[in-house]
Image: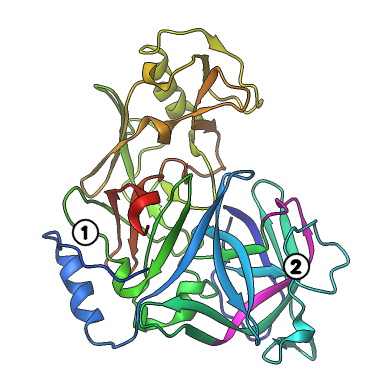
């Protein structure tokens, strides 16, 4: 979920600002970054941490289960590689959005400690691109997640945001878990033992998992790897470089357009539902889709300027392939690229056109049924086609 603003008044935090399982063994692909990661991981006897995730159908995002406080208090917060702040709603909360689950009460945790700046509480304000926001104060608190060792991983004195003025979020969520490479993200605060390795497998049904450390390596038959770009002057996002999009056999190159880049031009974000491309290039992709589909085009029922057609079946739509720098030709399932409206009988392309300065985003719908692994030290994102709902059953 892309952030427009993360404002911190602080005398002690140095941070990059952000804009928005069971153990298993798999064959290693012949890529040096995998071998390097596995050899480094063999030096630690720590278990591999993981957390359960569940699809939030109302908001089109994925919720990560973790515990905060002592005694542990479970929350379900959005799994978000597009931001770095971990925050949850806290009592007392004069301006909280309605939340189905109980709200965290810091007074009942004996490990909660509010951060202080020049003798006062240290406030934050985080505003996301969709207009939602959270305002509150920083604190340190114990965060607990599961581990394959059989013992939970307990992260003492983890910096979190205690939100007391929050707006616009779905009532099924308790907050956000930022997972980008910024210093306040969960993976950064877990420390170097886990090498910045994350993987998840998103499914629109059932429970799946997010992995950290040893079990986060994605490899084996069918795996493709894209170069990851980290821009020190462009916040703490994970960038990929989209070289082209193919609609069936028609390849639309970014070369020759303003979207073309060599150092990253699209964010991969688990907290954003659809995929967003810049206007001029995006309309070329939409035109290629329109040239294939034999059906009646209709206005977008959601008023989001999506390309929509009357159809009772998804089979009429073309296969779309994303070509990322590094050799990742990602052939996407039709479910990844087209969505049926709630009323039925209409399908829309899940690639949405926007204009600068809005960022291009590779969203979570496009990542469904892919085991997606991030390796920040080797600067790669790996994708492996996987039936996510069956992976950990």
**Location of residue 250 by image quarter:** top left
Residue 185, relative to residue 270: is it above or below?
below
The residue drawn where x is 46% and y is 83% is: 153
Residue 219 horizontal side relative to residue 363, left or right = left
Q: Which residue is mark 1?
A: 219
- Crowding at dot 2, Cα within 10 Å, few <14 / some 14-19 / many 20+, comes out as few
- Crowding at dot 1, Cα within 10 Å, few <14 / some 14-19 / many 20+, comes out as many
Kindly give the residue lying farthest to the front in the view shown: 393
Counting from the top left corner in percent of width and height, residue 253 is at 30, 30
Counting from the top left corner in percent of width and height, residue 58 is at 64, 43
Mark 2 or 1: in front is: 2
Counting residues from the start of the chain, the first of labels 2 and 1 encountered is: 2
The residue drawn where x is 50% and y is 70% is: 182
Q: Is residue 163 magenta?
A: yes
Q: In front here: 199 or 121?
A: 199
SS label for mark 2: loop
Q: What residue span does the magenta drawing correspond to?
A: 156-172
Residue 330, relative to residue 304: is it above or below?
below
Residues at circles 2 and 1 in contact by the CB criterion of under 8 Å: no
Q: In front here: 56 or 331?
A: 56
Residue 190 in view: yes
Residue 288 in view: no
Kindly give the residue lying farthest to the left in the view shown: 30
* Distance Cα–Cα, label 2 vs label 1: 39 Å
Kindly give the residue lying farthest to the right in the view shown: 94
Residue 209 horizontal side relative to residue 250, left or right = right
Helix, strand or loop: magenta stretch: strand
> Which of the image's four quarters has the C terminus?
bottom left
Q: In front here: 203 or 119?
A: 203
* Badge number at residue 102: 2
Q: Is residue 253 magenta?
A: no
Counting from the top left corner in percent of width and height, residue 45 is at 29, 88
């Amino acid at each position: 979920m892309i952030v427009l603003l993360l404002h911190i008044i602080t005398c002690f935090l140095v941070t990059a600002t952000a804009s928005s399982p069971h153990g298993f063994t798999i064959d290693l692909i012949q890529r040096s970054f995998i071998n390097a990661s596995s050899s480094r991981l063999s030096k630690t006897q720590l278990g591999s941490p993981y957390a359960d995730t569940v699809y939030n159908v109302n908001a089109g995002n994925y919720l990560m289960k973790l515990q905060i406080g002592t005694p542990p208090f479970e929350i379900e917060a959005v799994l978000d590689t597009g931001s770095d702040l971990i925050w949850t709603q806290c009592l007392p909360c004069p301006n909280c959005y309605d939340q189905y689950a109980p709200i965290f009460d810091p007074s009942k945790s004996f490990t909660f400690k509010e951060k202080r700046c020049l003798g006062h509480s240290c406030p934050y304000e985080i505003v996301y691109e969709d207009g939602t926001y959270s305002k509150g104060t920083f604190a340190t608190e114990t965060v607990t997640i599961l581990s394959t060792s059989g013992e939970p991983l307990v992260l003492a004195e983890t910096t979190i945001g205690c939100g007391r003025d929050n707006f616009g979020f779905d009532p099924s969520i308790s907050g956000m878990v930022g997972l980008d490479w910024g210093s306040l993200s969960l993976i950064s605060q877990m420390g170097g033992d886990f090498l910045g390795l994350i993987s998840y497998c998103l499914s629109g049904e059932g429970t799946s998992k997010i992995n950290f450390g040893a079990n986060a390596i994605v490899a084996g038959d069918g795996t493709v790897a894209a170069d990851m770009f980290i821009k020190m002057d462009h916040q703490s996002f994970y960038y990929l470089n989209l070289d082209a999009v193919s609609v069936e056999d028609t390849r639309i190159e970014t070369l020759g357009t303003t979207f073309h880049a060599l150092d990253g031009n699209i964010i991969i974000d688990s907290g954003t539902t659809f995929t967003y491309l810049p206007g001029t290039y995006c309309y070329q992709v939409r035109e290629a889709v329109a040239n294939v589909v034999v059906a009646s085009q209709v206005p977008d029922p959601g008023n989001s300027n999506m390309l929509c057609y009357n159809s009772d079946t998804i089979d009429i739509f073309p296969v779309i392939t994303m070509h990322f720098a590094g050799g990742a030709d990602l052939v996407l399932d039709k479910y990844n690229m087209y969505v049926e409206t709630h009323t039925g009988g209409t399908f829309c392309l899940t690639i949405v056109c926007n204009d600068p300065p809005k960022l291009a985003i590779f969203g979570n719908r496009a990542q469904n049924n892919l085991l997606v692994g991030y390796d920040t030290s080797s600067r790669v994102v790996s994708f492996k086609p996987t039936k996510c709902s069956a992976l950990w059953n």
